[in-house]
Every structure is written in C-alpha cells, then in structure tokens.
Image: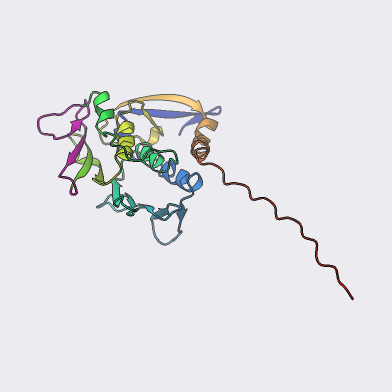
C-alpha cells in the first residue's frame, strides 16, 4: 500500500464478492488466538490445518488450483450429523470469516431453521428463469439449494461473462443453517471491502466499483489485532484456580 505521512491508501471494492481472496490470516489468526484452535506446523507442506479445541471441527487450506482451497469439516456429534463447507481461493476472506465467526460464537444459537435466503431477499436478490435459487441484482453471484433431504447441497457461484467462474462455495445440506445464513448475510452486505490498490483483482474489473481513501497506517496495522480482541471477548475467561493452602512441613522429632 502506498503511504505518505503516516497514512495508507486503500482501495474500496464493491460488490464485495469481486474483491478477491485477501489475507487468510483474517480467518486463521482469530481461530487460533481467540477461539483456541490448534495447528500443526509442517514447513515442507504448503498447507494449513487447524482443529477446534474439542477436536470436532477442522479447517484445512490447501493451495490446489483444481480443488477448493478452504475446507471446513465438522464430525458427527450425538444426533447432529457431520457436515462440510468448501470455499474457492478467490472467496473473500471477510465473507468466510462471517461463517467461522458464527461457528465459534459460544453464544451462537442452536440450529433453529434460519433461512439462508432471507438476507439475500432483503438485499433485493431475485430468481431469474434459469435459476432455482437467488441471484445478485447484477447477476454475478448465484445461491442455490439443490437436491432432496439427505442428498441436498447449497452452492454459491460467482461468475462474470468474460471470465470462467471466479469462485465457488459449497455447503452440505447438514450444515447448520445459521452458519450458512451468516455467510449469505455477509455476501449480500453492500459495504465495500478494502484491499491494497496494487492487489485489485483483474477479473470482473468492468463490473466492480473501486474508490480509494487514505487511512492512518496504524489503524490498518492494528485491524487484525482489534478483530482478535473483539472475538476473544466473546469467550469467558477460565476461572482462576484458588491457590493451594500452605501446609507447613512436618516437624522433625528425635
């Protein structure tokens, strides 16, 4: 980012689903530092694997051009079935973060039948003739729920005419709907996403709106730290153990 006198130039990109992938740390750092997800480090493998504290959920990032880069899997838990979600490399991390933030929210609701389409309808997404779901007003991003119970799948696809598909996301039908709704709410949010002006994606340039602003460099540098603090505050601090009572050593007797 270009900086002068303590400020940095940022590009604001709308619609947000064309902003490009961004920094994966926006997702992985809070999972580790705020939600306690553990990771294994293998310097010879270009991948990231994080596991939830209860070992029920796993996030995996694999830089494979032929497969989704992001995969989140959750094991079966009692009567709740296993589920999985995948995201392509160019899925904006801010939208993925909405999903993982909901997943790790300790006060988050149990799955109560929330409707992932609801935030899209509120944002004036509609159903064109060729679609079984909803499409963004510009027709670039589509969300569909396909299949029958037990064999269903939620799909999200972002495509522009002069390019192949930019990114896809998939959620198995067993994925808790409040998590998918968190994703679609962020997807439909009209707030632009900030990017380095030198990293504006080349795809979809004619369909996106780009403006620039100058912001304090310190604000940009501390944005992730502030995010981690805010998410960590959702988790109650563990109780402090009371100090063990002092027991004097036994007196020696002759």
Residue at horizontal 32%, vertical 31%? 185
- Magenta stretch bounds: 126-151
15 relative position to 197: left or right: left
Quarter assignment of residue 190: top left
104 relative position to 74: left or right: right
**Residue 252 screen position, x and y as percent:** 86, 71
Visible residue check, residue 53: yes
Q: Quadrant of the C terminus?
A: bottom right
Please determine whether, in this image, residue 219 is positioned above or below residue 103.
Answer: above
Visible residue check, residue 201: no
**Residue 20 screen position, x and y as percent:** 33, 38
Q: Is residue 241 part of the magenta span, yes or no?
A: no
Q: How many marks?
A: 0
Of residues 217 and 249, the one nearer the viewer is 249
Residue at horizontal 21%, vertical 32%? 140
Of residues 153 and 89, the one nearer the viewer is 153
176 relative position to 213: left or right: left
Residue at the far front in the pictured view: 253
Q: Is residue 147 part of the magenta span, yes or no?
A: yes
Residue at the far left in the pictured view: 129
Quarter assignment of residue 129: top left
**Residue 245 screen position, x and y as percent:** 73, 55
Quarter assignment of residue 51: bottom left
Residue at horizontal 38%, vertical 54%? 56
145 relative position to 208: left or right: left
**Residue 193 screen position, x and y as percent:** 37, 31
Please determine whether, in this image, residue 253 is positioned above or below residue 79.
Answer: below
Residue at the far right in the pictured view: 254
Majority secondary structure of magenta residues: loop
Please determine whether, in this image, residue 192 is positioned above or below residue 50.
Answer: above
């Amino acid at each position: 980012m270009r900086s002068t006198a303590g400020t940095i130039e940022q590009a604001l990109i709308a619609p947000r689903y064309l902003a490009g992938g961004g920094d994966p740390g926006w997702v992985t750092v809070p999972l580790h530092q705020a939600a306690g997800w553990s990771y294994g480090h293998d310097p010879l493998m270009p991948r990231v694997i994080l596991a939830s504290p209860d070992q029920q959920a796993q996030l995996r990032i694999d830089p494979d051009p032929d497969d989704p880069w992001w995969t989140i899997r959750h094991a079966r838990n009692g009567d709740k079935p296993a589920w999985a979600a995948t995201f392509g490399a160019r899925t904006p991390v801010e939208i993925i973060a909405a999903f993982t933030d909901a997943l790790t929210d300790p006060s988050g609701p149990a799955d109560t039948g929330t409707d992932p389409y609801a935030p899209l309808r509120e944002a004036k997404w509609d159903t064109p003739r060729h679609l079984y779901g909803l499409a963004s007003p510009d027709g670039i991003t589509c969300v569909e729920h396909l299949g029958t119970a037990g064999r269903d799948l939620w799909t999200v696809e972002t495509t522009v005419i002069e390019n192949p598909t930019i990114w896809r996301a998939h959620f198995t039908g067993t994925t808790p709907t409040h998590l998918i709704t968190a994703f679609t709410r962020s997807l439909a949010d009209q707030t632009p996403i900030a990017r380095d002006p030198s990293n504006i994606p080349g795809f979809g340039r004619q369909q996106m709106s780009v403006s620039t602003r100058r912001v304090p460099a310190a604000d940009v540098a501390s944005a992730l730290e502030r995010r981690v603090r805010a998410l960590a505050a959702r988790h109650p601090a563990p109780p402090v153990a009371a100090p063990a009572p002092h027991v004097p050593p036994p007196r020696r007797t002759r």
